[in-house]
Amino acid sequence: MRVAVLGCGVVGTEVVRLLTTQASDLAARVGASLELVGIAVRDTSIERDPVVDRALLTEDAEGLVERADVVVEVMGGIEPARTLLLRAIEHGAAVVTANKALLAQDGPTLYAAADAAGVDLYFEAAVAGAIPIVRPVRESLVGDRVQRVLGIVNGTTNYVLDKMSTEGLDLDAAVKEAQALGYAEADPTADVEGYDAAAKAAILASLAFHTRVSIDDVDREGISGITADDVVWAERTGYAIKLLAIAERSDQGVQVRVHPALVPLTHPLAGVRGAYNAVFVEAEAAGELMFYGRGAGGAPTASAVLGDVVSVARHRVLGGKGPVESSYAALPVLPASAARTRYQVRIDVDDRPGVLATVAAVFATHGVSIEAMRQAPAPLGPDGVGFARLILTTHQASEEALSATVAAVADLDAVRRVISVLRVEGA
Ligand SMILES: NC(=O)C1=CN([C@@H]2O[C@H](COP(=O)(O)OP(=O)(O)OC[C@H]3O[C@@H](n4cnc5c(N)ncnc54)[C@H](O)[C@@H]3O)[C@@H](O)[C@H]2O)C=CC1
Ligand SMILES: N[C@@H](CC=O)C(=O)O
Ligand code: NA
């Protein structure tokens, strides 16, 4: 079985390592040997890990995909990855990719091409790294009705938030560490601004609900607005800040969103540290399932890639192929603004009688019910006058009602500033 690897960076190098060092075990599991016939790179002359046989390096990716039975794409980006995968499929190769950006933007083109050519298209590594989640959702739960998928699906941002919390690092310093550890995307903006999580959420929602959700359908907010102060105050009030991906199905359609949220410290998601990911899936018959493990990094991601390589290679040996895209449900995508969540609003107000009642009245006027209110002592303001910090947690409210409330609160004379507004999930 001829295997070609496109890209030899963080993940590609580890894929090559497993293909090389586990060759005999892999052959026994597949029922045929996996021969690495080439590794496409941009520059064959640069220094690489010794596990990479220089004789296999080529800058001719197009030529390489035409002489492989299994093409592994770990170069990332939209082009030339898309064209190369389509070319591989046209030539009858099975493809394995870790490229969530491409799948979330143009997955249906690839699925259709693979279906027409009768070849496998596998992508376990594209969502939550090493964690088996694509296959459980696509295959194990295909007999059930999935209602909700919720979790942490980006290792970089989870690592960054964890470092902000445990070591007081600022966001930029923590992102640099995540890059050095091989967790971040080539452009870490994709992680920090939630695009990577949105791509994964789109893929999971499509699989879970048998419909098509693209990255453009996902309501997305990243963590660039989260400050060290937010992290400290979250903990003081019993929460951790996590970047969550949430996909929900209702009678009206599907709704998919990615945003930072406060998660109670007692919730299992709050204990997900470093670059680990965790995904909860709620299905009608199965109930709640939790998937947990390393969501980023070269070796963990290579594990998922190799799992797919063995599967598609086995299909070639035994005949047949794996599942194709299932989008028959064709559900409408609803705006995430329709979601009702709890919120925590942190504001600084003048510390004088009646202010609390005035603020509470604004919430009441907008139909937003306050669940809990806490007042924390705050230092003197710049004008030397004392002020108080109010932390208000609401019952479930619509985004529209909450935004109107916050705008009206900010307009009150007694309100110095609205410091932060964060959703509360998992409580
Ligand atoms: N690093 C991680 O933890 C994870 C990465 N992924 C995905 O795996 C893929 C690869 O990620 P990394 O290895 O981290 O990135 P990387 O940037 O370390 O490696 C990509 C490699 O592909 C090469 N490349 C890019 N365009 C090329 C072209 N046209 N021809 C030949 N080589 C080309 C680059 O020079 C680079 O060496 C991406 O799609 C990423 O989203 C998925 C899960 C986890
Ligand atoms: N950049 C991604 C890598 C895995 O998908 C992340 O940090 O999760
Ligand atoms: Na995975």
Image: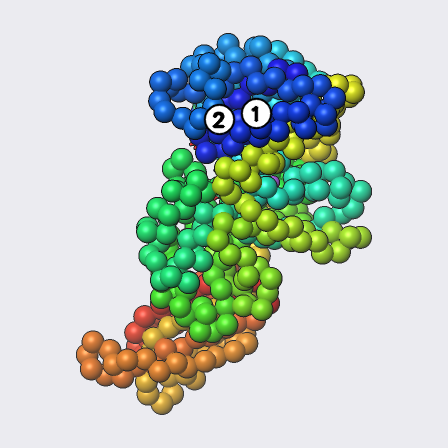
**Mark 1 and mark 2 in contact (Cβ < 8 Å)?**
yes
Report if residue 221 is visible in the image: no
Mark 1 Cα shell of 10 Å, populated few (<14), some (14-19), many (≥20): some
- For residue 163, above or below residue 321: below
Nearer to me, 43 or 326:
43
Residue visible at 50% across and 37% down in the picture: 298
Residue visible at 61% across and 17% down in the picture: 35
In the image as oriented, which residue stretches furthest toward the bottom?
A: 353
Nearer to me, 182 or 346:
182
Task: Specify the amino acid type for callout 1.
Answer: Thr
In the image as oriented, which residue stretches furthest toward the left?
A: 383
User: Is 118 on the left or on the right of 258, as rendered?
Assistant: right
Element type at marker 1?
helix
User: Quadrant for ligand 3?
Assistant: top right
Element type at marker 2?
loop
**Number of marks:** 2
Give percent across and percent down for residue 312. 69, 25
Report if residue 399 is visible in the image: yes
Give percent across and percent down for residue 103. 56, 32
Give percent across and percent down for residue 218. 53, 44
- Disc sitting over residue 127 in the figure: none
Residue visible at 48% across and 29% down in the picture: 13
For the residue with label 2, is its CB less than 8 Å from the closest atom of ligand 1?
no
Give percent across and percent down for residue 212. 63, 36
Q: Quadrant of residue 270?
A: bottom right
Task: Specify the amino acid type for callout 2.
Answer: Val
Spatial separation of the CA atoms under disc 2 and disc 1: 8 Å
Q: Please give the residue where the numbered disc 1 appears in the rendered image.
A: 20
Q: Please give the residue where the numbered disc 2 appears in the rendered image.
A: 51
